[in-house]
Amino acid sequence: MDVISRNKSHFGFKILLAIKAVIILSSTVTSPFADQISYQTLDRREIETMRKMTAKEFHRRRCQTKPSEGTPSLGTNVYWTVGSSFKLYQLSCNIGAYIETTAWYRVEKGRLKPLRIKHPVFIKTNMKTGDDQKKDLQLEKFIFDHFLVNAILDPKTGRLTQNSYCCAGDLFRRTSWGLKESELYLESYEEDLVLDGRHEPQFSFKFKK
């Protein structure tokens, strides 16, 4: 997969901060971009069952085994159905005030397997100038990881988005994947690496399917 376009700019879409989608107990949406997508939140018993199945990995990744003090929510735990046969689980790993990490699995032949999610890895260049405005990003490699930060799957578009940010959103990384024919493909990557009080990406990359 190669980068087909990139943009370095101080103008872009504003990031929405501290907003979490409230998932209805169940819903079905017909999408022009993906198969029919339905989703259902898991109850406590179902969450406990899934946690037993993923216990070793969740321990290795240092996931919370129970809600933190002052955080009564069990987080985002959703069972997704795409089309007639593509089944996904989104399971909460760690949850805080504004950040939640979720693990994504697919059901294949009755078995739970990590969802192969391709991530671009960039390195920063032009760092010796000491000027944030002159920083640049260069694609180094791709990795696969099924743990995402603040991930949202939009049933209307079939787009999965990860938003990682700090400093009240002034610095952020946003990665998007498209869901089509029971597979995920990397769509785009945006990053704001300048602490300037504006929630706008300086770098935008789009990828081939």
Image: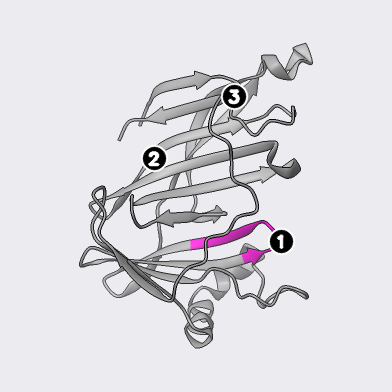
Give SS at disc 1: loop
Q: Could you tell me the amino acid type at mark 1?
A: Ala
Instruction: Name the N-terminal-most of marks 2 and 1.
Output: 1
Give SS at disc 3: loop
Give SS at disc 2: strand
Residue 137, label in figure? none
* Residue of label 3: 202
132 drawn magenta: no
User: How many residues crowd around disc 3 within 10 Å: few (fewer than 14), some, or many (20 or more)?
Assistant: many
Name which quarter of the figure residue 8 lies in.
top right
The residue drawn where x is 68% and y is 36% is: 171
Instruction: Name the N-terminal-most of marks 1 and 3.
Output: 1
Relative image position of residue 206 (x, y in whole percent): 41, 29
Instruction: Name the N-terminal-most of marks 2 and 3.
Output: 2
Q: Could you tell me the amino acid type at mark 3?
A: Gln
Name which quarter of the figure residue 63 lies in.
bottom right
* Residue of label 2: 186
Judged left or right of residue 141, residue 165 is right
Q: Mark 3 and mark 2 in contact (Cβ < 8 Å)? A: no
Identify the magenta region: 94-103
The residue drawn where x is 64% and y is 48% is: 17
Q: Could you tell me the amino acid type at mark 2?
A: Leu
Judged left or right of residue 28, residue 22 is right
Q: Is residue 176 above or below residue 108?
A: above
* Residue of label 1: 97
The residue drawn where x is 76% and y is 15% is: 131
